[in-house]
Amino acid sequence: MIHEGYIMTPWGIPLRKRAIMKVSELKNELLDYWVAKANDVAEVHVIDSHCLINGNRWKPSADWAQGGPIIEREGINLKYSLEPGSEHCTAYMGSGRNRQKGLTPLIAAMRCYVDFKFGEDVAD
């Protein structure tokens, strides 16, 4: 019997399914976690809805002191639109690729960065 969340391989071995998340839907500590992974941080933890690196709170999607240097280093462009809609900030890399939206410039930029590093989807 295979439990929910598992698939059977051709060799009869059950494997855990990996949840696929759209980068465009990442927010809060999950977005911050993936930004840390994009920065090649090996030890990153999410505890009580907080992303931690070496015991320090990591929130580049909400803190300009952490997210700003990533935007500058990676050359992420930001655009703000007055069009109606909930996600009116757009971020993109120089070529226009990896375009992502967000409620704030930091959320859009961090989604853009994760998209650049991992693609439009990430696995748990």
Image (cartoon, helix red, strand yellow):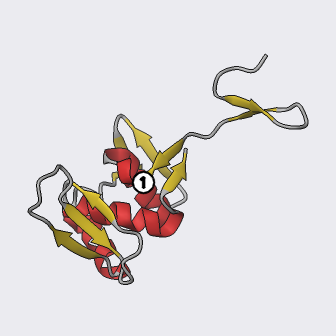
Q: Residue furthest right?
A: 11
List x then y, in percent, for residue 106: 24, 62
- Near mark 1 (Cα within 10 A), the count class, few <14, some 14-19 or many ≥20, is many
Identity, as a three-letter code, of the amino acid under mark 1: Val
Residue at numbered disc 1: 23
Q: Is residue 74 visible?
A: yes
**Picture residue at 46% right of the left edge, 46% below the top:** 45
The part of the image, by quadrant, that contains residue 48 is top left
Point 42% across, 42% down: residue: 46
Which residue is situated farthest in the left direction here?
Answer: 82
Task: Note whether 48 is above or below 114 in the view shown.
Answer: above
Q: Nearer the viewer, residue 118 or 35?
A: 118
Where is the N terminus found, in terms of image quarters? top right
Image coords of residue 99 (percent x, y): 35, 68
Q: Position of residue 13 (x, y in %)?
A: 85, 32
Q: Residue at 31% of width from left, 76% of height from top?
A: 76
Q: Residue furthest front?
A: 83
- Picture residue at 22% right of the left edge, 67% below the top: 65
Residue 40 in sight: no
Secondary-structure class at tag 1? helix
Q: Position of residue 43 (x, y in %)?
A: 52, 54
Residue 47 in the figure: left or right of residue 106:
right
Image position of 86 (left or right of 82): right
Q: Nearer the viewer, residue 91 or 107?
A: 91
Where the C terminus falls, by quadrant?
Answer: top right
